[in-house]
Amino acid sequence: MSEKNEQGKRAARDRLIQQREQAKARDRRRRTLIVSTAVVGVLGLAAVVGVIAANTDGKSDKSKASGPAVAPSGATGKDALAIRVGADEAPSTLTIWEDFRCPVCAQFETAFRDTIHEMERDGQIKVDYHLATIIDGNMGGSGSLKAANAAACAQDAGKFSAYHDVLYSNQPAETDDAFGDNDKLIELAKKVPGLDTPEFRGCVEDGKHDAWVEKSNKAFSDGGFQGTPTALLNGESIFPKKGDEPITVAHLKKWVAEANKGKKPATPTATP
């Protein structure tokens, strides 16, 4: 009887182990499904935002900023409308058009931020950010404009990349114009060491770069882009897909590697 009891106990333990392994496998499949669904959701939402952007062309920024367009320090590209992150010598350029109120832009950032920063640090790419304000036009308010101005003020302080990421990590709901409050934007600057200074506060409160942001938004509208985010690798659209391949972390790394084949990367640097 004792031997039979031992055999029964071993069988019970084996069944328990098998059940646990099956549960772990189901959990792994569930996580994979969630991640895959999230990526598909981003791509689907991108198409919706593109339609909205196309249908509201020219309607954002109801009250135009007065005065000349003052570009932030180090702005580059045509009419100095791009803020560059990464080494100028990097062999490939990732161009991103975005709106700090755009929920799909936040999803894009969440999915690809770490990969993009990794490739910046490794000298594989430089990223040219262009700022748009289409959600202000779609939903009303001024959060897109003011957040973009604050980001340009952070660029003046040499802290654009860090503040850019803070804004997306703390993005309000699309219908909530929280970024339209300068105090909120200054409060978020405290999350970036050394950014909350009198110079930064004055730049934000005075709307120093508002006219530059509006000029950037006009370039977005005139460029015929379908929505935000728009991402281009060396001028070729990669969001939501490149050719027949949808954008994923693995595909983005592969596309950059293909574009850089035979080219020397820039000297590795730390992300600002």
Image (cartoon, rainbow, N blue to C red):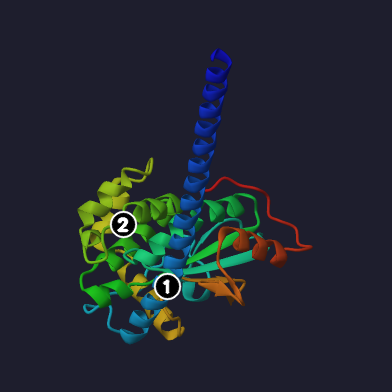
The residue that appears at 45% across and 58% down in the rendered structure is 109
Mark 1: few/some/many CA within 10 Å (<14, 14-19, 20+): few
The residue that appears at 76% across and 63% down in the rendered structure is 261
Between discs 2 and 1, the one toward the N terminus: 1
Q: Nearer the viewer, residue 244 or 216?
A: 244
Above-or-below relation of 223 to 115? below
User: Residue pushed farthest right?
Assistant: 262
The residue that appears at 27% across and 54% down in the rendered structure is 185
Q: Are marks 2 and 1 in contact (CB under 8 Å)?
A: no
Residue 226 in the figure: left or right of residue 187? right
Which x, y percent locates residue 201? Answer: 27, 51
The residue that appears at 60% across and 62% down in the rendered structure is 252
Which x, y percent locates residue 123? Answer: 65, 54
**Distance from the alpha carbon under mark 2 to that under mark 1:** 20 Å
Residue 155 in the figure: left or right of residue 7? left
| Nearest-to-viewer mark from 2 and 1 | 1
Q: Amino acid at mark 1?
A: Gly
Above-or-below relation of 51 to 158? below
Q: Which residue is mark 2?
A: 171
Residue 230 appears in the figure: yes
What SS does tag 2 mark?
Answer: loop
Which x, y percent locates residue 117? Answer: 54, 52
Residue 66 appears in the figure: no
User: Residue pushed farthest top?
Assistant: 2
Q: Which residue is mark 1?
A: 44
